Image (spheres, rainbow, N blue to C red):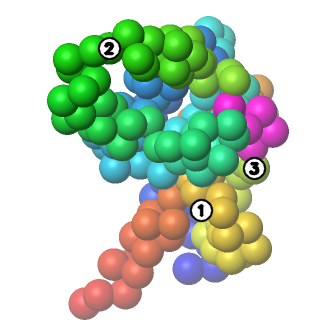
């Protein structure tokens, strides 16, 4: 596995958001795809950041947005009198990915090895996933901790 490159097992079908995506939409994407995070890409396809569940929880938000949405849908008082929550809902609805994203994410180059990816994940416990970029900073893939286990299938008979 010494010569195994991460581009051989990274996810190439990338789901991403733009800096202008609302946090509500980003939260839905994370929840619907069971992601821990996803790259933030500009109009030219270049990486400008990463948005993670951790970012959404820790950077000024007191509650995970998908959880907040579920609560709002199920609170009878909210349905009966939305005016009590109007200000809070407007503030949250106005937030964009750019407001909480990490604009200096850890990345790996497309020619990184399996060993390098394992080392990065072991040294950076909160990082997940990691965008894979080319020399132009275009995202060509993404790798998560889960993806690190994919090469183990090569050992099976």
Disc sitting over residue 106 in the figure: 3
Q: Report, in whole angstroms, how far the alpha carbon at label 1 lies from the one at label 3.
A: 18 Å
Nearest-to-viewer mark from 1 and 3: 3
Query: Could you say which quadrant of the image residue 105 lies in?
Result: top right
Residue 73 in the image: state x and y as whole percent: 22, 29
Residue 133, quarter of picture: top right
- Residue at image x 51%, y 66%? 145
Q: Is residue 17 visible?
A: no
Q: Position of residue 81 (x, y in %)?
A: 28, 15
- In this rendering, is residue 94 above or below 26? above
Place of residue 92 in the rendered image (x, y in percent of width and height, measured from the top left): 53, 21
**Of 13 and 7, which appears nearest the observer?**
13
In this orientation, which residue lies closer to the viewer: 110 or 53? 53
Q: Count the labels in the image.
A: 3
Q: Nearer the viewer, mark 2 or mark 1?
A: 2
**In the rendered view, does 16 fall on the left or right side of 76?**
right
- Looking at the image, do the residues carrying marks 2 and 1 touch, with CB atoms under 8 Å apart? no
Q: Which residue is mark 1?
A: 5
Residue 82, numbered label: 2
Q: Quadrant of the N terminus?
A: bottom right
Instruction: Please tell me whether mark 2 sits on a helix, a strand or a loop.
Output: helix
The stretch of residues the image draws in magenta is 100-105
Cα gap from disc 2 to disc 1, whole angstroms: 53 Å
Mark sitting earlier along the chain (1/3):
1
Residue 30, labelled with which disc? Answer: none
> What residue is shown at x 37% (from left), y 87% (from top)?
155
Does residue 63 appear left or right of residue 110 in this picture?
A: left
């Amino acid at each position: 596995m010494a010569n195994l490159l991460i581009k051989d097992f990274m996810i190439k079908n990338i789901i991403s958001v733009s800096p202008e995506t609302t946090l509500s939409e980003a939260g839905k994407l994370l929840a619907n795809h069971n992601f821990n995070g996803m790259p933030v890409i500009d109009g030219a396809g270049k990486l400008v950041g990463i948005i993670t569940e951790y970012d959404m929880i820790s950077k000024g938000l007191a509650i995970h947005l998908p959880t907040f949405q579920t609560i709002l849908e199920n609170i009878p008082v909210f349905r009966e009198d939305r005016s009590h929550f109007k200000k809070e809902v407007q503030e949250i609805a106005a937030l964009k990915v750019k407001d909480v994203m990490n604009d200096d994410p850890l990345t790996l180059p497309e020619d990184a090895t399996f060993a390098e990816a394992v080392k990065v994940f072991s040294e950076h416990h909160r990082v997940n996933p990691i965008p894979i970029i080319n020399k132009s900073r275009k995202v060509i893939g993404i790798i998560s901790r889960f993806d690190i286990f994919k090469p183990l299938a090569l050992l099976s008979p």
